[in-house]
Image (tube, rainbow, N blue to C red):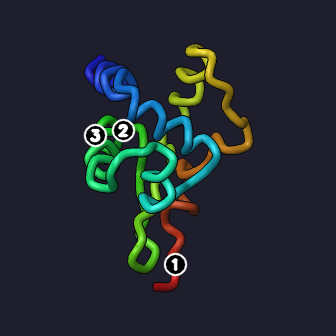
């Protein structure tokens, strides 16, 4: 029950919900997120950390950039209940062990 409350609290913030909506399209680095959300990069980074702690997002480092993606498939169902359309093909984005363990060139 505690995990569910963390998820709902995290999604209750407008900025965090916008971030999750953007990440439905697929992984994005902070430099791609903050112009869309129209907040400072530091604000976005703080909000991304809240979403990570809630178990909604995960990240991977590629060179100097950190990419964020939805790591919890339950989020798609929650968003659909809220009337937010999700692209079914992205449901495994970040939730695949091979995807998480893939090594990237720096």
Residue annotated with mark 2: 55
Residue 6 placement: quadrant: top left
Secondary structure of residue under mark 1: loop
Tell me which residue sits at (26%, 21%) in the image: 2
| 5 horizontally vs 37: left or right | left
**Spatial separation of the CA atoms under disc 2 and disc 1:** 23 Å
* Residue neighbourhood size for the residue with mark 2, other residues' Cα within 10 Å, grouped as few (<14), some (14–19), many (≥20): some
Residue 99 placement: quadrant: bottom right
* Residue neighbourhood size for the residue with mark 1, other residues' Cα within 10 Å, grouped as few (<14), some (14–19), many (≥20): few
Tell me which residue sits at (50%, 76%) in the image: 103
Mark before the other along the chain sequence, 2 or 1: 2
Which circle marks residue 104 in the picture? 1
Mark before the other along the chain sequence, 1 or 3: 3
Residue 9 placement: quadrant: top left
Q: Quadrant of the N terminus?
A: top left
From this view, report whether residue 78 is shown above or below residue 23: above
* Residue neighbourhood size for the residue with mark 3, other residues' Cα within 10 Å, grouped as few (<14), some (14–19), many (≥20): some
Secondary structure of residue under mark 3: helix
Residue annotated with mark 3: 50
Residue 75: horizontal and vertical position, in percent?
Answer: 51, 30
């Amino acid at each position: 029950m505690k995990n569910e409350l963390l998820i709902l609290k995290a999604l209750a913030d407008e900025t965090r919900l916008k971030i999750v909506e953007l990440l439905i399209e697929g992984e994005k680095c902070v430099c791609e997120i903050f112009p869309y959300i129209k907040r400072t990069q530091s604000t976005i980074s703080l909000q991304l950390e809240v979403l990570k702690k809630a178990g909604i997002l995960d990240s991977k480092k590629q060179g100097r950039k950190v990419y964020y993606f939805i790591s919890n498939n339950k989020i798609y169902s929650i968003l659909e209940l809220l009337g937010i359309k999700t692209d079914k093909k992205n449901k495994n984005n970040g939730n695949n062990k091979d995807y998480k363990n893939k090594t990237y060139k720096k």
